Image (cartoon, rainbow, N blue to C red):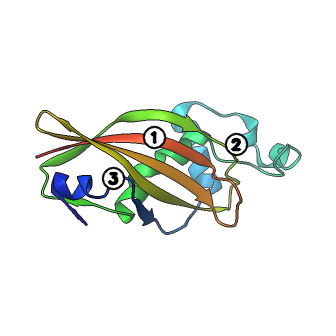
């Protein structure tokens, strides 16, 4: 738990830690496909995907990114603020696939804390990694605003 805006400022440049691993299921992928309308075969057609470039279905890149709000509170929290809101993202990349059945975790580095009226804008680097993989699956600049 990080104490307020001053606590965040003191940690700029620091790696805050990792979430536990979570398994990526075909059910999650199918539900995400239904929610977004993205039913590309590489995600939802298990038999066809076995013949594809990854040997099986993979999660949508944006499904991976969307796990940030679930995983980031397992890395850190901020006390002494009235509320925090997602403000947006900067650069987002998907360097390697997330195969269905793999285990994924999130690592977070705090990269900037800037004052804004009523609080602070906090920029973090989110790195999503598959257990045992050499390359990350998603690297994203994620921006939150915390208000006091």
Q: Nearer the viewer, mark 2 or mark 1?
A: 1
Q: Are marks 3 and 2 in contact (CB under 8 Å)?
A: no
**The quadrant where residue 10 appears:** bottom left
Residue 24 seen in the figure:
no
Crowdedness of circle 1 by 10 Å Cα count: few (<14), some, many (20+)? Answer: some
Q: Is residue 69 above or below residue 132?
A: above
In the image, which disc is placed on residue 43?
2
In terms of sequence position, does the residue under pointer 2 or pointer 1 come before the other?
Answer: 2
Q: Residue furthest right?
A: 51
Which SS class for mark 3?
A: loop
Q: Residue at x 60, y 57 (%)?
A: 129
Q: Residue at x 54, y 67 (%)?
A: 21
User: As drawn, is 51 to the left or to the right of 79?
Assistant: right
Which SS class for mark 2?
A: helix
User: As drawn, is 82 to the left or to the right of 75?
Assistant: left
Q: Residue furthest bottom?
A: 20
Q: Quadrant where the N terminus lies?
A: bottom left
In the image, which disc is placed on residue 12?
3
Which SS class for mark 1?
A: strand
Q: Nearer the viewer, mark 3 or mark 2?
A: 3
Crowdedness of circle 2 by 10 Å Cα count: few (<14), some, many (20+)? Answer: many
| Spot occupied by residue 43 in the image (x, y as percentages of width and height) | 70, 42
| Spot occupied by residue 126 in the image (x, y as percentages of width and height) | 48, 50
In terms of sequence position, does the residue under pointer 1 or pointer 3 come before the other?
Answer: 3
Q: Residue furthest top?
A: 37
Q: Nearer the viewer, mark 1 or mark 3?
A: 3
Closer-to-camera residue (90/74) = 90
């Amino acid at each position: 738990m990080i104490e307020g805006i001053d606590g965040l400022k003191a940690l700029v440049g620091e790696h805050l830690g990792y979430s536990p691993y979570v398994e990526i299921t075909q059910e999650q992928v199918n539900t995400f496909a239904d929610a977004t309308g993205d039913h590309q075969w590489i995600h939802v057609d298990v038999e066809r995907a076995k013949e594809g470039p990854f040997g099986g279905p993979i999660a949508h890149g944006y499904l991976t990114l969307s796990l940030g709000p679930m995983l980031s509170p397992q890395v850190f929290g901020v006390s002494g603020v009235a509320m925090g809101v997602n403000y947006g993202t900067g650069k987002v990349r998907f360097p390697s696939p997330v195969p269905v059945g793999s285990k994924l975790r999130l690592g977070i580095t705090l990269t900037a804390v800037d004052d804004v009226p009523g609080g602070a804008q906090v920029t973090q680097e989110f790195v999503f990694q598959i257990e045992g993989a050499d390359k990350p699956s998603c690297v994203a600049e994620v921006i939150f605003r915390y208000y006091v």
